[in-house]
Image: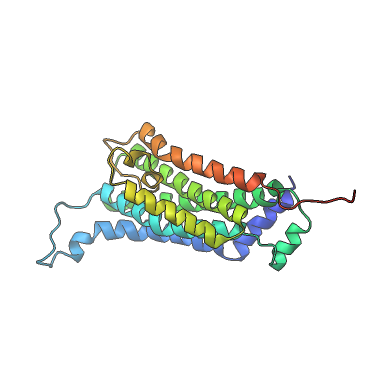
């Protein structure tokens, strides 16, 4: 596949400021979430109506980060990825591509791959900032479970975005892709009330529990499995459906 296509997609993310906005969102929450958790006792210390059950520690700081990024920033990443892959044959850019290309792989794979790479890199930047802030504010903490939980979340954010991108490529609509993805997210939240189902839901990977004692790779794999299956199905649908049919005279 021509490298120029990947380069074009990279410059589209860079010049439209989508890359800058996404990285800034992850990094901002990496700072704000940890600071909020650290200084929460000071903020409500003079309130007679609100009392903390315990002093926040490193778990609370990272948990606040994954909650914020797993909901707000993940939604932004999903929408940006869907917009990058929603080519309509009624738009000028869509007419240009659809009139010159018949392979969905050559048309959509570079867009999906670049979106996944950009979102994964942005999530990594946010995780690095959050880990540093956690050390600076709370001191030493178990690095293995913390890195593992943030890695699972970064992968989940990227997979959710790729799922939305695949849907957008197949339906040619970012709105439909965003609506379906949001519907799946809401359904998972409803099913999370069932204790036996909760470990296997994609939202569990999107907002993993930060705990040094109970974190395990097997639990992380359980929460990522359904998301991997959904993403694979969306990619298969996007990359296998023909863009248009070429008819030749009999």
Q: Is residue 171 visible?
A: yes
Q: Is residue 193 above or below residue 37?
A: above
Q: Residue at x 42, y 50 (%)?
A: 127
x, y (%) of residue 141? 29, 42
Classify residue 70 as left or right of residue 214.
Answer: right
Residue 2 x/y as whole percent: 75, 47
* Residue 184 in the image, given as x and y percentages of width and height: 43, 51
Say which quadrant the N terminus sits in.
top right
Q: Closest to the observer: 52 or 199?
A: 199
> Residue drawn at (41%, 61%), measured in percent from left and top?
28
Q: Residue at point 35% right, 45% down?
A: 208
**Residue name at image x 51 percent, y 60 percent:** 79
Foreground residue, 40 or 223?
223
Give the percent coordinates (x, y) of residue 122: 49, 53
Q: Is residue 118 above or below residue 223?
A: below
Left or right relative to 216: residue 228: right
Q: Nearer the viewer, residue 186 or 121?
A: 186
Q: Residue furthest right?
A: 250
Residue furthest top in the image: 218
**Nearest the eye: 179 or 155:** 179
Farthest residue, direction front = 250
């Amino acid at each position: 596949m021509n490298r120029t296509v990947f380069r074009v997609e990279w410059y589209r993310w860079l010049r439209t400021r989508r890359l800058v906005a996404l990285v800034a969102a992850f990094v901002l929450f990496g700072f704000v979430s940890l600071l909020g958790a650290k200084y929460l006792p000071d903020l409500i210390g003079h309130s007679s109506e609100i009392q903390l059950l315990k002093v926040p520690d490193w778990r609370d700081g990272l948990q606040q980060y994954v909650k914020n990024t797993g909901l707000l920033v993940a939604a932004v990443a999903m929408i940006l990825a869907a917009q990058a892959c929603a080519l309509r044959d009624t738009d000028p850019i869509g007419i240009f591509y659809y009139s010159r290309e018949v392979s969905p792989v050559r048309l959509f794979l570079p867009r999906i791959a670049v979106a996944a790479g950009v979102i994964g890199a942005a999530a990594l930047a946010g995780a690095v900032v959050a880990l540093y802030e956690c050390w600076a504010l709370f001191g030493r903490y178990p690095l293995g479970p913390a890195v593992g939980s943030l890695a699972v979340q970064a992968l989940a954010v990227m997979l959710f975005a790729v799922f939305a991108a695949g849907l957008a490529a197949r339906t040619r609509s970012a709105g439909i892709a965003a609506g379906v993805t949001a519907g799946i997210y809401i359904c998972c939240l409803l099913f999370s009330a069932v204790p036996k189902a909760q470990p296997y839901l994609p939202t569990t990977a999107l907002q993993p529990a930060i705990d040094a004692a109970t974190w395990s790779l097997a639990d992380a794999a359980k929460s990522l499995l359904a998301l991997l299956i959904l993403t694979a199905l969306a990619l298969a649908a996007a990359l296998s459906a023909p863009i248009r049919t070429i008819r030749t005279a009999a």
